[in-house]
Structures are given as structure tokens and as C-alpha cells.
Image: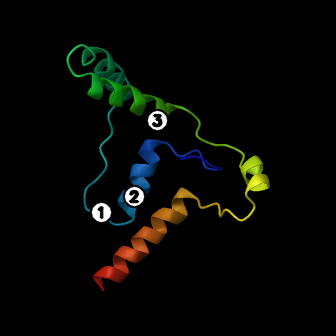
Amino acid sequence: MGGPENMTMTSLASAVQRAGPDVAPRHVPPSALQAMSLVFRPFWAERARQAAAALVLDTIDMRFDPAAIRARYPDLPLTSPSDVIARIAREKDQAGA
């Protein structure tokens, strides 16, 4: 997920949590993710790769300029993560009402 907003996995989890789920997001510190990616590698490779990916996703800048995509696909709508989360929350509220 990328776009004009630099949304880390922590900020995404917080935004989703504000939209309605009763479970608070948990944050695993970067040092723990790095340790997990090394320690788990010999006997739980899948979990090691997930920890490594989580570390990358929470530390890189996810912003990008959509100009090239807009030029090639001008009818393709650009939707921010905040808009998607708000839409899901509205649909959830309508389904519960």
C-alpha cells in the first residue's frame, strides 16, 4: 500500500482500530522483529520471513508519486488508506443497523 501518505503498519493498525474493532493493535518493537527474523530462521522460516517483512514495512517510506500511473490509467481512481478504512467502517455500521 502506498501513495501520498507515508503510512506505517503501526499507523495503519491504529487507523483500523479507530474505525471500530474492539481489539487494540499490538506493536512489536523493531529490535524484537529483527531478533525473531534471525532466531526463527533455522526452525520456523515462515515466521522469520514474516518478522523480517514486518520490520521492512514499518521502517520504509511507503509514499510514491502516482503521476505515471494516472497518466497511463486516467480512469483508475486513487483511494487513500484513510478513505478505505472510513468506507469499511460505514459499511460495518450500516450492516449492524
Earlier residue among tags 2 and 3? 2
Please state if 41 lies on the left or on the right of 66 as rendered: left
Label 2, label 3: how far apart the Cα atoms are: 16 Å
To which residue does mark 1 refer? 21
Which quadrant would residue 34 be assigned to in this image? top left
Say few, some or many: other residues with alpha carbon within 10 Å of mark 2 (under 14 / 14 to 19 / 20 or more).
Answer: many
Could you tell me residue 22's position as x and y percent? Answer: 25, 62
Quadrant of the image containing the C terminus: bottom left
Which quadrant would residue 21 be assigned to in this image? bottom left
| Residue projecting furthest to the front | 72
Say few, some or many: other residues with alpha carbon within 10 Å of mark 3 (under 14 / 14 to 19 / 20 or more).
Answer: some
Mark 1 residue type: Pro
Q: Who's the residue at 40% across and 53% down the image?
A: 14
Secondary structure under tag 2 reads: helix
Could you tell me residue 58's position as x and y percent? Answer: 46, 35
Say few, some or many: other residues with alpha carbon within 10 Å of mark 1 (under 14 / 14 to 19 / 20 or more).
Answer: few
Please state if 33 lies on the left or on the right of 61 as rendered: left
The numbered mark at residue 49 is none
Observer-nearest of 52 and 14: 52
Q: Who's the residue at 40% across and 33% down the image?
A: 54
Please state if 44 lies on the left or on the right of 1 as rendered: left
Label 1, label 2: how far apart the Cα atoms are: 7 Å
Q: Are marks 3 and 1 in contact (CB under 8 Å)?
A: no
Earlier residue among tags 1 and 2? 2
Q: Are marks 1 and 2 in contact (CB under 8 Å)?
A: yes
Could you tell me residue 68's position as x and y percent? Answer: 76, 47
To which residue does mark 3 refer? 58
To which residue does mark 2 refer? 16
Q: Who's the residue at 50% across and 31% down the image?
A: 59
Could you tell me residue 51's position as x and y percent? Answer: 34, 28
Vertical arrangement, residue 90 with respect to residue 64, above or below: below
Mark 2 residue type: Val
